[in-house]
Image (spheres, helix red, strand yellow):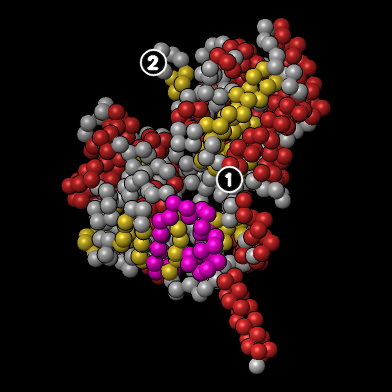
Amino acid sequence: MNRTMNKLIALMLGIMMLCAAVPAMAEPGVYTALYSSEVTTLNYLIASNAWDQTVGANVIDTLVEYNNLGEIVPSLAEKWETSEDGLTWTFTLREGLKWVDNMGNEVADLTAADFATAIKYVLTPENESSIEGVLETAEIKNAAAYYKGEVTDFAEVGVKAVDARTLVFELENPKPYFLSMLTYGCFMPAYGPQLEEMGKDFATDNTKMYYCGAYRLEVYEPQQEHVYMKNASNWDAEHIYIEKIDRIYNAEAGTIAPNMALRGEVDAADITSDILDDWRQNYPQWVTKGRSDLQYSYFFCFNFNPTFDAEYEPENWKKAVDNANFRHSIMSALDRTYTLRVDEPDDPETLVLNTITPVGFASDANGDYTKNAAFAGIEENYFNAEKALDYKAKAVEELTAAGATFPVKVLYPYNGNSTNWGNESVLLEQQLEGVLGTDYIDVIVYQGQSQSYLTDFRRSGNYAFQRCNWGADYADPETWVDPFWYKMNDDGTYASAYKYGFPENALNGGYPETKAVMEAYYAKAAEAKAEVTDIEKRYSLFAEAEAMLINNAIAIPYRGELADYQVTKIDVYEGEYAAFGICNYRFKYQHVQDEFVTAEQNEASKAAWLEQMQK
């Protein structure tokens, strides 16, 4: 009897252990996940960060959207046409579009006027929209002038509701990529009467806004729970497969979500680098990677406007950074695959970019933009220790004559909020000093405060050399000029519009060697911007401009956006896909599976997706 009982107990323990390691069945059509940081606003007309924009992405539809292959398809607009000169875009809305409240009750028809009213709200400075600049980039007629108060009658702004279903945009200059910009919050509609009545109180909670997207935010309890319910009145309800999205707050979500996923309490969790090895050993079948994201590009910048303290010798840095051989010595000494092992230990070379524009971002009749003839031989700029020492020897001779001293101090800050960035920075210091020698450079790795990092360092010029990044705003290589572009000040000097690398300061004096390079770059980029009819020529001009930055070591391409490791019950390759806008944050078109997506399933979906993308 005892022997039999022992066998039963052992069997029961075995079943319990197996159950603990196998996810429970998901509730049909329900997706549950944790979140650790509360949104700062529900107001999609002012939101600029990704987490805040996720709300609007799921509860408000746009004129157009993207399918899972990155193709623009109709959404609230069923069709559109463009004038021959490219300055006028006319959209026809679908019939029967509805606004609903947070409980799903239909409250009003959605009309073309709701787009115009929303844009007026974005262009009203008192509403403090942080995405107003997108309208200026799109060059909506008189948008910038209205925002600055130079035009006071909104009727003069180039957005018109001709009738309930006809919306017209007038541009100041042709924009070949205008359609791709329409998935940003500033182009989203809002119910006009409600918006005008509430003003800055609009969307301060989930009951003070109406919904026209795939979901409505039924429950909004900050730092407790967000519950999204399918909008049955949506024009495309048949393609909204997840009925309910339940996001539960927990400040320690990043730490506890993986174990909760194993217990079947949540349907997704990020697998961070500190637990990746454990998961690969114990649950390898469920560790998958997210879909590649072409929205961001990471690159290293030399700072031409140093504002750091005297202890880091800013005047000596100015002499060094103006010297092309000095910049090239660092570029050639930097082994990018070495530092990328922090983020991708298995296959770091797959992350490396040789151009600032990511591979696959844009293409014309000649193929991928990054294969343009202007980039021929671009790879010769990168890691080569022998060439790095040759550049060093030339730089030492030239800089000594110019009065520079060695070692040159290279202040390299990073955001303390990222453990991986910190580890990467240490490797970068070791690797650069190992190749070039501490007699030549002294890389000073500095941990910045996470909450104020951008303000304290990148945007203020408090660095010598730094990893920067930029996210695409529209489907055109011009978007990768934006981080280096400038504006002319009233006193005739140049100022960066975005403060990434400050290359425009090379035009303001004090950088005689670099000035000619930057003058040529800006002239070529301006020529490319002006070419709006011949797309192949436009792309070639932008490629020539970008190649100038790289071949002169003004900026050093690094990597694209990392695809996070995760465990999830959603096949990421089903969802909308774009390298800009808010489509990637949407749950439309996706299903919740009963079990986690397996590594094998993930690879098969990726292969099928890539095959379709290449057709």
Where residue 260 appears, as percent x and y from the top left, is 51, 64
Q: Secondary structure at mark 2?
A: loop
- State which quarter of the image contains the N terminus: bottom right
Q: In the image shown, does 462 or 524 lie closer to the viewer?
A: 462
Q: Amino acid at mark 1?
A: Glu
Residue that appears at 67% across and 48% down = 344
Q: Secondary structure at mark 1?
A: loop
Instruction: Please check the rendered image and state whether residue 251 is part of the magenta-colored stretch, yes or no.
Output: yes
Q: Which of the 4 quarters of the picture holds residue 595?
A: bottom right
The part of the chain drawn in magenta is 240-269
The answer to whether residue 135 of the structure is visible from this angle is no
Where residue 551 appears, as percent x and y from the top left, is 68, 27
Residue that appears at 69% across and 61% down = 281
Asked if residue 329 lies left or right of residue 182, the reply is: right
Q: Amino acid at mark 2?
A: Asp
Q: Badge 1: few (under 14), some or many (20 or more) residues near its Cα, within 10 Å?
A: some
Which residue does the numbered mark 1 point to in the structure image?
Answer: 561
Asked if residue 369 lies left or right of residue 92, the reply is: right
Q: Residue 490 shows which numbered tag?
A: 2
Q: In the image shown, does 404 or 521 lie closer to the viewer?
A: 404
Asked if residue 18 lies left or right of residue 212, the reply is: right
